[in-house]
Image (cartoon, rainbow, N blue to C red):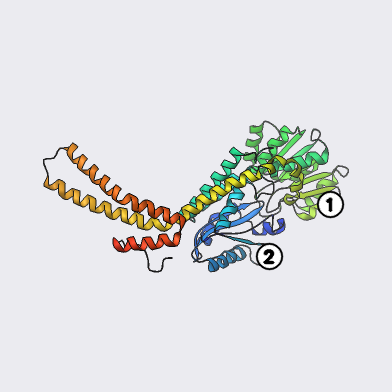
Amino acid sequence: MPVVCLGLSHHTAPVDVRERHAFPASRMAEALTALRDYPSVVEAAMLQTCGRLEIYAELEEYEAGIEQLKAFLANFRHGATGYDLESYLYTLLGRDAVHHLMRVCTGLDSMLIGEAEILGQVKDAYVQAHHANAIGSTLHRLFRDALNAGKTARTRTRIGDESTSIATAAIDLATTRLGSLHDASVLVIGTGKMGRTAARRLRSAGAKRLILTNRTMQRAQELIAEIGFGDAIEMPHLPDALAAADVVVTSTGSSEFVVEPDTVRAAMSRRPERPLFIVDIAVPRDVDPDVGQIDNVTLIDVDGLKTVVDEKLEVRREAIPHVEAIIADYVENFARWYRSRAAVPVIASLTQKAEAIREGEIEKLLARLPDLSEREKQLIVGSSMTIVSKLLHSAITRMRDKAERNQSEAIEHARVLDDLFELNVVADGDE
C-alpha cells in the first residue's frame, strides 16, 4: 500500500516546534495545492490540531515521495528552523499509516485519550483537502473509514465517557489552582471551538464573571448571547481585561503572540497582590513564553495540561482494548478494498465491452422485428441483460475475491482477461 503518513505530534515534538510548523487556516488551501504539485504525490491531506501536524498521502514512489513531503514541510512558509526537523518527524507506511489514522480518529493517539474534538478536526482536514482537489478515491475512502471508526468507537465503547477536552482541562486546572471559580473573573480570548467550549464550561463551573474578547466583536457578542453569561469586550481593551482577570484561557488562530510581556506587566502593576493564572491552549501559542517569568503570573501551555486529566480517564483507558478491536476491523476492511482496486479497471472495461456488444446486437434484432409490441421489446432487452450479467458474474466475483486475497495473482488474472477480451487496460509494467 503506497499510503503514507508523515508528521510530528505531541509524542515527538514540543509545542515550540509544533507551532513553527502550523499552517494558518487562511493558507491551508494554498499549502495543499503546493503539496499536490510535487511529482510523486498522487493524493494528499493535512491534519493540523494543537497536538499534531500530519500529512496523509498516496505516493507514486515511496522513497522519492517521502523526501518530497519532508522538503515541503521544511520549505513551505517556514524556511530555516535552527533545529533538525527530521529528529521530530515520524513516517508510517501502508497498513501502519491506515492504523494510525484510525487511532487518531478514535482518540487513542490524542493528548487527552478519547477527546471529542478530534473527529471534527479530521473531518475538517478531509473537507479542506476535497475543496483543494488534493484527494482522490484512496484518501476519500481512508478518511471516510477512519471517521466511521471514530463514531463506532464512541457508540460502542466508553472511550468518550467523562467529558474532557483540551478546553475543559484548562478550566479544570484553573479550578484546581484556585479551589473554586465562584469568586473568580475569567478572561477567554478567542471564540473558536476551544474558546466556545471553555466559555460554556465556565458557566457550569460557576465562575463569578466571564470576560470574552475576540478580533471580531460580533462573534464575541453572539457567543455571550448564546450562553446567556458574560461580557464581550473589544481586543484593544485587552489590558483592562487582564487587569481585572484572575484566570485567562486563550485560544485564537493568530500566527503571532496575542498577549505580550509588556501588556501583562502593565496589568499586574494595577493588581500587584493578586496572582494571574494563564492557560494558553493555542498552537501556535497566543502568549509569549516570557510572560511566565513575570512575578505572580503562572503560565501553562497546551503540553502542560495532560497531567491534569490523567486521573479522570481511567474509564476511557479500560475501553482501549475494545477500541483497538474496532480499529483492527476497519483497517482490514480498508486493506481488502485497497487490494481489490487491481481488479477495477479490467472489470469495468469487460463490463463496458459486453454491454456495448449487447446493445449493438439488440438494436439490430429490434430493427429486423418492427412489429414487436413495447412489452415484447422490453422482455427481449431484459433477457439479454440477464444473459450478459450471468455470464460475467462468476468471472467478476472471482476477480474481486482474488484481488482482496492476493494482489499479485489478481494482476495475473487481469492480464489474462485483458488479453483474451482485447481490453487493453493492463499496462505491461503493472505489478
* Nearer to us in this view, 141 or 209: 141
The reply, left or right, for residue 79 in relation to residue 139 is right
The numbered mark at residue 87 is: 2
Label 1 Cα neighbours within 10 Å, binned few <14 / some 14-19 / many ≥20? some
| Secondary element at tag 1 | loop
Q: Does residue 143 lie above or below 244 as drawn? A: below
Q: Position of residue 147 (x, y in %)?
A: 55, 46
**What kind of residue is marked 2?**
Ser
Q: Are marks 2 and 1 in contact (CB under 8 Å)?
A: no
Q: Position of residue 17 (x, y in %)?
A: 69, 59
Label 2 Cα neighbours within 10 Å, binned few <14 / some 14-19 / many ≥20? few
**x 78%, y 41%: residue:** 174
Q: Position of residue 313 (x, y in %)?
A: 72, 42
Q: Does residue 426 lie above or below 49 as drawn? A: below
Q: Does residue 194 lie above or below 16 as drawn? A: above
Q: Quadrant of the C terminus?
A: bottom left
Query: How many numbered tags mark residues here?
Result: 2
Find disc 1 in the rendering and name its residue: 294
**x 42%, y 58%: residue:** 342
Q: Return the residue found at the far right.
A: 273
The reply, left or right, for residue 376 in relation to residue 227 is left
